[in-house]
Image: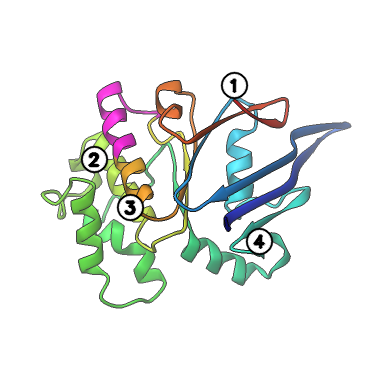
Amino acid sequence: MNDLMHVQGIAKVYQKAHDQVDVIEDVHLRIANRESIAIMGESGAGKSTLLQVMGGLLSPSKGKVLVDGVSLYDVRDAQRAQIRNQKIGFVFQFHYLLPEFTALENVCMPARIARLHGYEEKAKTLLTQVGLEHRLTHKPSELSGGEQQRVAIARALMMQPSILLADEPTGNLDQKTSDQVAQVLFSLMQEKGALVLVTHSMRLAEKADKVYRLTKGELVLE
Protein backbone atom coordinates (compact mmCIF):
# COMPACT_ATOMS: atom_id res chain seq x y z
CA MET A 1 0.00 0.00 0.00
CA ASN A 2 1.46 3.33 -1.04
CA ASP A 3 1.57 6.06 1.60
CA LEU A 4 0.08 9.44 0.79
CA MET A 5 2.07 10.79 3.72
CA HIS A 6 4.87 9.28 5.78
CA VAL A 7 5.95 11.02 8.98
CA GLN A 8 9.44 9.85 9.96
CA GLY A 9 10.79 10.57 13.44
CA ILE A 10 9.38 14.08 13.72
CA ALA A 11 10.37 16.17 16.73
CA LYS A 12 9.70 19.81 17.55
CA VAL A 13 11.68 21.62 20.21
CA TYR A 14 11.24 25.19 21.43
CA GLN A 15 13.89 27.08 23.35
CA LYS A 16 12.49 29.27 26.15
CA ALA A 17 15.13 31.27 28.01
CA HIS A 18 17.38 28.55 29.45
CA ASP A 19 14.80 25.79 29.10
CA GLN A 20 14.17 23.39 26.24
CA VAL A 21 10.56 22.38 25.62
CA ASP A 22 10.07 19.14 23.68
CA VAL A 23 6.59 19.53 22.19
CA ILE A 24 6.64 16.40 20.05
CA GLU A 25 9.24 13.64 20.10
CA ASP A 26 10.08 10.96 17.53
CA VAL A 27 6.61 10.76 15.95
CA HIS A 28 6.11 8.16 13.22
CA LEU A 29 2.93 7.87 11.17
CA ARG A 30 1.91 6.37 7.83
CA ILE A 31 -1.23 7.59 6.08
CA ALA A 32 -2.76 5.63 3.21
CA ASN A 33 -5.35 6.54 0.60
CA ARG A 34 -8.97 6.45 1.84
CA GLU A 35 -7.79 6.25 5.45
CA SER A 36 -9.07 8.43 8.28
CA ILE A 37 -7.00 9.11 11.38
CA ALA A 38 -7.97 10.93 14.57
CA ILE A 39 -5.40 12.41 16.95
CA MET A 40 -6.50 13.08 20.51
CA GLY A 41 -4.73 14.48 23.56
CA GLU A 42 -4.98 17.05 26.30
CA SER A 43 -4.81 20.79 25.61
CA GLY A 44 -1.19 21.80 25.13
CA ALA A 45 -0.11 18.27 24.21
CA GLY A 46 1.21 19.44 20.83
CA LYS A 47 -1.57 18.19 18.55
CA SER A 48 -1.88 21.40 16.55
CA THR A 49 1.91 21.68 16.34
CA LEU A 50 2.09 18.17 14.90
CA LEU A 51 -0.60 18.97 12.34
CA GLN A 52 1.23 22.15 11.27
CA VAL A 53 4.47 20.19 10.80
CA MET A 54 2.62 17.54 8.80
CA GLY A 55 1.07 20.22 6.61
CA GLY A 56 4.28 22.01 5.73
CA LEU A 57 3.47 25.07 7.84
CA LEU A 58 6.06 24.58 10.59
CA SER A 59 9.56 23.15 10.19
CA PRO A 60 10.41 20.25 12.52
CA SER A 61 13.50 20.25 14.69
CA LYS A 62 14.32 16.85 13.25
CA GLY A 63 12.70 14.17 11.13
CA LYS A 64 10.99 14.13 7.75
CA VAL A 65 7.49 14.47 6.31
CA LEU A 66 7.08 12.76 2.93
CA VAL A 67 4.09 13.62 0.73
CA ASP A 68 3.81 11.24 -2.22
CA GLY A 69 7.47 10.44 -1.63
CA VAL A 70 8.66 14.07 -1.61
CA SER A 71 10.30 15.31 1.59
CA LEU A 72 8.47 18.54 2.48
CA TYR A 73 11.33 20.19 4.32
CA ASP A 74 14.08 19.20 1.89
CA VAL A 75 12.70 21.28 -0.98
CA ARG A 76 12.68 25.01 -1.64
CA ASP A 77 9.99 27.18 -0.06
CA ALA A 78 8.27 27.69 -3.42
CA GLN A 79 8.01 23.95 -4.07
CA ARG A 80 6.76 23.31 -0.53
CA ALA A 81 4.08 25.98 -1.04
CA GLN A 82 3.08 24.32 -4.31
CA ILE A 83 2.75 20.93 -2.59
CA ARG A 84 0.63 22.50 0.14
CA ASN A 85 -1.63 24.16 -2.39
CA GLN A 86 -2.08 21.11 -4.60
CA LYS A 87 -1.94 18.12 -2.25
CA ILE A 88 -2.84 19.26 1.27
CA GLY A 89 -6.11 20.79 2.42
CA PHE A 90 -6.60 22.52 5.78
CA VAL A 91 -9.70 22.98 7.94
CA PHE A 92 -9.32 24.85 11.23
CA GLN A 93 -11.51 25.40 14.28
CA PHE A 94 -12.21 28.91 12.99
CA HIS A 95 -13.31 29.03 9.37
CA TYR A 96 -11.10 31.96 8.23
CA LEU A 97 -13.51 32.86 5.44
CA LEU A 98 -13.02 36.24 3.79
CA PRO A 99 -15.94 38.33 5.10
CA GLU A 100 -16.34 40.51 2.01
CA PHE A 101 -16.75 37.54 -0.35
CA THR A 102 -19.68 35.19 -0.89
CA ALA A 103 -19.58 31.47 -0.10
CA LEU A 104 -18.96 30.71 -3.77
CA GLU A 105 -16.17 33.29 -4.04
CA ASN A 106 -14.49 31.95 -0.89
CA VAL A 107 -14.48 28.41 -2.27
CA CYS A 108 -13.10 29.65 -5.61
CA MET A 109 -10.22 31.50 -3.95
CA PRO A 110 -7.56 28.71 -3.97
CA ALA A 111 -8.14 28.12 -7.70
CA ARG A 112 -8.01 31.85 -8.42
CA ILE A 113 -4.71 32.13 -6.57
CA ALA A 114 -3.37 29.19 -8.61
CA ARG A 115 -4.60 30.98 -11.76
CA LEU A 116 -6.72 28.07 -12.90
CA HIS A 117 -9.67 28.37 -15.26
CA GLY A 118 -13.21 27.04 -15.24
CA TYR A 119 -13.25 26.61 -11.49
CA GLU A 120 -16.65 28.13 -10.68
CA GLU A 121 -18.64 25.04 -11.66
CA LYS A 122 -16.41 22.85 -9.50
CA ALA A 123 -16.92 25.24 -6.57
CA LYS A 124 -20.68 25.04 -7.06
CA THR A 125 -20.47 21.24 -7.10
CA LEU A 126 -18.52 21.22 -3.83
CA LEU A 127 -20.99 23.56 -2.16
CA THR A 128 -23.80 21.28 -3.32
CA GLN A 129 -21.96 18.28 -1.85
CA VAL A 130 -21.79 20.01 1.54
CA GLY A 131 -25.48 20.92 1.32
CA LEU A 132 -25.11 24.63 0.59
CA GLU A 133 -26.34 24.94 -2.98
CA HIS A 134 -28.90 27.46 -1.71
CA ARG A 135 -26.23 29.62 -0.03
CA LEU A 136 -23.89 30.38 -2.95
CA THR A 137 -24.32 34.15 -2.83
CA HIS A 138 -24.42 34.50 0.96
CA LYS A 139 -21.53 36.14 2.78
CA PRO A 140 -20.08 34.54 5.94
CA SER A 141 -22.01 36.90 8.23
CA GLU A 142 -25.23 35.60 6.67
CA LEU A 143 -24.39 31.96 7.42
CA SER A 144 -24.70 29.89 10.59
CA GLY A 145 -21.61 28.49 12.31
CA GLY A 146 -22.15 25.07 10.77
CA GLU A 147 -22.67 26.56 7.32
CA GLN A 148 -19.48 28.63 7.64
CA GLN A 149 -17.50 25.51 8.53
CA ARG A 150 -18.98 23.60 5.59
CA VAL A 151 -17.91 26.42 3.26
CA ALA A 152 -14.42 26.10 4.76
CA ILE A 153 -14.45 22.36 4.04
CA ALA A 154 -15.52 22.97 0.43
CA ARG A 155 -12.72 25.53 0.05
CA ALA A 156 -10.18 23.06 1.48
CA LEU A 157 -11.26 20.49 -1.12
CA MET A 158 -11.20 22.91 -4.08
CA MET A 159 -7.74 21.83 -5.25
CA GLN A 160 -8.61 18.13 -4.80
CA PRO A 161 -5.98 17.52 -2.10
CA SER A 162 -4.84 13.97 -1.44
CA ILE A 163 -4.71 14.74 2.31
CA LEU A 164 -7.09 16.84 4.39
CA LEU A 165 -5.79 18.05 7.77
CA ALA A 166 -8.52 19.21 10.15
CA ASP A 167 -7.68 20.90 13.47
CA GLU A 168 -10.68 20.78 15.85
CA PRO A 169 -13.08 21.23 12.89
CA THR A 170 -16.16 20.94 15.12
CA GLY A 171 -14.72 22.59 18.23
CA ASN A 172 -16.95 25.67 18.07
CA LEU A 173 -20.17 23.88 17.10
CA ASP A 174 -23.07 22.36 19.02
CA GLN A 175 -23.55 18.57 18.98
CA LYS A 176 -26.10 18.43 16.16
CA THR A 177 -24.09 20.75 13.91
CA SER A 178 -20.87 18.90 14.80
CA ASP A 179 -22.41 15.63 13.63
CA GLN A 180 -23.48 17.25 10.35
CA VAL A 181 -20.01 18.68 9.69
CA ALA A 182 -18.36 15.37 10.63
CA GLN A 183 -20.62 13.52 8.20
CA VAL A 184 -19.56 15.87 5.41
CA LEU A 185 -15.85 15.49 6.24
CA PHE A 186 -15.81 11.71 6.35
CA SER A 187 -18.12 11.11 3.38
CA LEU A 188 -16.18 13.40 1.04
CA MET A 189 -12.76 12.02 1.97
CA GLN A 190 -13.89 8.39 1.64
CA GLU A 191 -14.18 8.92 -2.11
CA LYS A 192 -10.50 9.77 -2.57
CA GLY A 193 -7.71 10.89 -0.29
CA ALA A 194 -7.04 10.70 3.44
CA LEU A 195 -8.32 12.58 6.47
CA VAL A 196 -6.29 13.45 9.56
CA LEU A 197 -8.15 15.28 12.28
CA VAL A 198 -7.24 16.62 15.69
CA THR A 199 -10.12 16.56 18.14
CA HIS A 200 -11.08 16.51 21.82
CA SER A 201 -14.30 14.69 20.93
CA MET A 202 -14.31 10.92 21.34
CA ARG A 203 -17.64 10.92 19.51
CA LEU A 204 -15.88 12.38 16.46
CA ALA A 205 -12.68 10.35 16.86
CA GLU A 206 -14.59 7.06 16.89
CA LYS A 207 -15.68 7.71 13.30
CA ALA A 208 -12.04 7.41 12.16
CA ASP A 209 -10.32 4.21 11.04
CA LYS A 210 -7.54 4.72 13.60
CA VAL A 211 -7.34 6.77 16.79
CA TYR A 212 -4.01 7.98 18.17
CA ARG A 213 -3.28 9.82 21.41
CA LEU A 214 -0.48 12.36 21.75
CA THR A 215 0.93 12.13 25.28
CA LYS A 216 4.18 13.65 26.52
CA GLY A 217 5.22 14.29 22.94
CA GLU A 218 4.70 10.70 21.78
CA LEU A 219 2.00 9.43 19.43
CA VAL A 220 0.42 6.16 20.56
CA LEU A 221 -2.21 4.06 18.78
CA GLU A 222 -5.29 3.61 20.97
The region drawn magenta spans 171-183
Secondary structure type for disc 3: loop
Are the residues at dot 1 and dot 3 in contact (C-beta closer than 8 Å)?
Answer: no
**Residue 113 occupies quadrant:** bottom left
Q: Which residue is mark 2?
A: 147
**Residue 102 occupies quadrant:** bottom left
**CA–CA distance between discs 4 and 3?**
28 Å
> Looking at the image, which is closer to me, 4 or 82?
4
Q: Position of residue 47 (x, y in %)?
A: 60, 34
Amino acid carrying mark 1 in the image: Glu
| Residue at 65%, 58% in the rendered image | 66
Q: Which residue is mark 4?
A: 72
**Residue 75 occupies quadrant:** bottom right
Secondary structure type for disc 1: loop
Q: Which residue is mark 1?
A: 42
Amino acid carrying mark 4 in the image: Leu
Disc nearer the start of the sequence (4/3): 4
Disc nearer the start of the sequence (1/3): 1
Q: Is residue 28 magenta?
A: no
Q: Which residue is mark 3?
A: 98
Amino acid carrying mark 2 in the image: Glu
Q: Residues within 10 Å of mark 1 (few under 14, many from 20)?
A: few
Q: Is residue 102 visible?
A: no
Disc nearer the start of the sequence (2/4): 4
| Residue at 29%, 57% in the rendered image | 106
Q: Position of residue 120 (x, y in %)?
A: 23, 68
Secondary structure type for disc 4: helix
Q: Is residue 177 above or below residue 55?
A: above
Amino acid carrying mark 3 in the image: Leu
Q: Position of residue 215 (x, y in %)?
A: 68, 25
Are the residues at dot 2 and dot 4 in contact (C-beta closer than 8 Å)?
Answer: no
**CA–CA distance between discs 1 and 2?**
28 Å
